[in-house]
Image: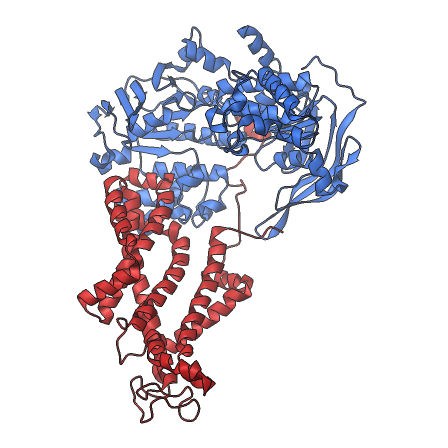
Chain colours: A red, B blue
Amino acid sequence: MNKESKIHDYSAKSEVGFVRTRRTRLQRILLELRKAPPTAIIGLFIIIFYIILALFAGQIAPYGEAEIFPIPYAPWGGDHIFGTDQIGRDVYTRLIYGARNTVGIAIITTILAFVIGGFFGLLAAILGSWTDQILSRLVDVMMAIPSLIFALMLLSIFGTNAINLIIILAVLESTRVFRLTRAVGMNVVVMDYVEVARLRGEKIGWVIRKEILPNILPPLVAEFGLRFCFTFLAIAALSFLGVGIQPPSADWGSMVRENAGLINFAHYDIKAGLTPLLPAAAIAILTVAVNFVVDWFLQKTSGIRDEK
Amino acid sequence: MKNKTIDKKKILLSMSNIHIEGFADERWHKIIKGIDLTLYRGEILGLIGESGAGKSTLGLAAMGFARPGCRFTGGEIIFDSMKLHDMSENQKRKLWGTRIAYVAQSAAAAFNPAHKLINQTIESAVRSKIKNEEQAVKDANHLYKELQLPEPDKIGFRYPHQVSGGQLQRVMTAMAMSATPDLIIFDEPTTALDVTTQVEVLASMRHIVEQYNTAAIYITHDLSVVAQMADTIKVLRYGEEIEQSKTNEMLSHPKESYTKSLWSVRSIEKQEKTNDDIILKVDNVTAAYGSSKVLFNVDIRLPRGRTVAIVGESGSGKSTTARVITGLLPPLNGKVTFNGKTLPAALKNRSKKELQKIQMIYQMADVAMNPKQTVSEIVGRPLEFYQGMKGKVLDKKTIELLEMIELDESFMDRLPNELSGGQKQRVCIARALAAEPEIIICDEVTSALDQIVQEGILKLLMRLQKELNVSYLFITHDISTVKAISDEVVVMFQGKVVEQGSKSSIFSPPHPEYTELLLSAVPEMDPNWLNNYLNSRK
């Protein structure tokens, strides 16, 4: 046998694997950003802008959130850039505070939805058999009911406040998250390395945390972006219907509703007519921006590349 | 094949100074570095080398084709006095399928599941108007017959999923032959098949290529297969030609040391030893997936510190036996005894101690390791889990294990995709060793690896056995691996144990019928082996 090893100098260490340059996380993020398409960059900028608005609403806004001025429906310009609303609150101020309320609640709701849906989805994927059956059928039943109507019903039963709103929307959204997590989780559960962990006698929590979660994170992150948009729109819709975020908290959905009547005055003052469209535009722009970023992320993680 | 004369005047394909680059990791890498290739009419050229040697890339280049992500950077390809390297995609497409055909490794992936076989067989011939449909169907049925497919007149009307893998591979050959091309490129056509099926496919492919005097390029990593097929053999490594010569010469007098090393792989030998101290006993086990039974009264004995190889074709129940032993699949009846004690049937009823003592190594090291964990996490976890090691002690022991498998500290922070195939399998071995097991079940651990790497892994496993007195249950379909490392052999067929015995008794006649078939179907490094095999059957 020694003779052979002289013929070819084989050594396990010198075998060439796929070697790549090691970069720190920050370097990798910067590198990715440099290669990102312009839409994603625009989207990122808009999202950062919204986050700044939400965080520093108190410093940026000229007036208080619920401060009432003597003139309702004041025109644009002067002390009030976008005028005042039906009871004399500054529209510009409320737009800024709206970012905090609407976006903040949407983020909390989405996170909660992912915690609930993700946990049960993985449980269904790992345990399979009847656990999977019960959970999946339950989710099917919940998904069969139109979620907006379901939410309206539950909100009128349990009462309208921010906490109920968050919990109810999170549970309803978690059904979608459940489905996705279960599907991608199933693909990972069948891998040999999960079997190795089970053969070792690892607890289910460890298997989820260490073996499965890191490998399904990319699709979940992408889904998080999309789900955030839907939650955000749902909150706006509920507020528009009057059961969402309650006054005096500023919120874009209810701002659209409260000022909707002004559209009729577009005839006489185009700016007044635009007032209800401002919060609507705020909603639209954020949704588009998040989608830009999600698209980029999805394209990266799904491995679709343009062949040249 | 060896006695046919090749007309040296008629050059069919000449490739000179071919350079091809591939794009990976944001850079262009050289895949083929200036290879020349000449093929005469009716000649079969075998291209061999390890994975990554550029065999398939060169084979496709003979069609004037570069895979997506690859590009030609130099060289000339002249096929029947046409300059392929200058032709447009459209012009080349007219040649493909009609004058140059390609047979891929995985026939199952190459067929459209929604169309009948016959339609796919004749498609290129009919579309290019070489013959009309009626004639093409007639010819195809004739080809099916030549290829010894069952019911040649009817098999074409089946869908791809209705025939077996070996049959599908032959239908694909018929598809390639349908337009009677001048050149066929076979890209590892039998690699995915069982040995007994492989012989049939090889015999029928060779028969048909000779009958139509078609030239062929036969790509494979298996020397004994290429010895049966090729007139000439070309050895590639890292995109360069190592040597080329006639098959006979190449087998008897390889010139380059690299070629010699390819030849020497099967030379590992192990002194057979048996032992009456039985560590693991599988007793009368019957198991089923759902309602279909896959194991029938299986009995296996594993002596301490020895290697028992389980051989059989795919579907023979080898891996299922492993699943029963590990507790992943509780058997319907029968029991597994470890160190004299009956193991609980189901995984969840086994104690940590019992789990620790039986470890497993898998065929595909890529999917047996979490791609998001570093080598130190992968190897360190069993140490932490079973022995409660932490911090410095854990690191020290992990490095010790890596050194035991001939790697070192520098691998600690690597992720699995930064390792080569052999290194991955070594890390899996280290992970199994970390649990300090008494038994390691090796499920086809070398079958996804190149010959030289296989040799390294097998030697490592043998050394570890000597040092740690660990017992191996070695599942494989490769007879040469069995010969290399086992003390005892279990032959399985259709969920039953055909026989168990010491290596020497299993490999010496008389054999039960199935063992005979299995052993005789393994190609040998003798170019006349296939002829002899076929003659002996008649």
| Quarter occupied by residue B65 | top right
x then y, percent, for residue B173: 60, 24
Q: Position of residue B171 (x, y in %)?
A: 56, 24
- Residue at point 43%, 38% (across, down): B365
Foreground residue, B431 or B31?
Answer: B31
Q: Position of residue B61 (x, y in %)?
A: 68, 37
Q: Nearer the viewer, residue A244 or A112?
A: A244
The residue shown at (34%, 27%) is B320
User: Would residue A224 be found to the left or right of residue B248 on screen?
Assistant: left
The residue shown at (22%, 37%) is B348
In the picture, the quarter occupied by the C terminus of chain B is top right
Residue depicted at x 32% and y 62%: A110
Q: Residue B246 in the image: x percent, y percent?
A: 70, 21
Residue B259 occupies which quadrant of the picture?
A: top right
Is B29 or B484 nearer to us in this picture? B29
**Visible in this render: residue B85?**
yes
Q: Quadrant of residue B408?
A: top left
- What is the count of numbered marks? 0
Q: Nearer the viewer, residue B365 or B105?
A: B105
Q: Is residue A44 left or right of residue B239?
A: left
| Quadrant of the drawing holding the N terminus of chain B | top right
Whether residue B235 is visible here, answered yes or no, is no
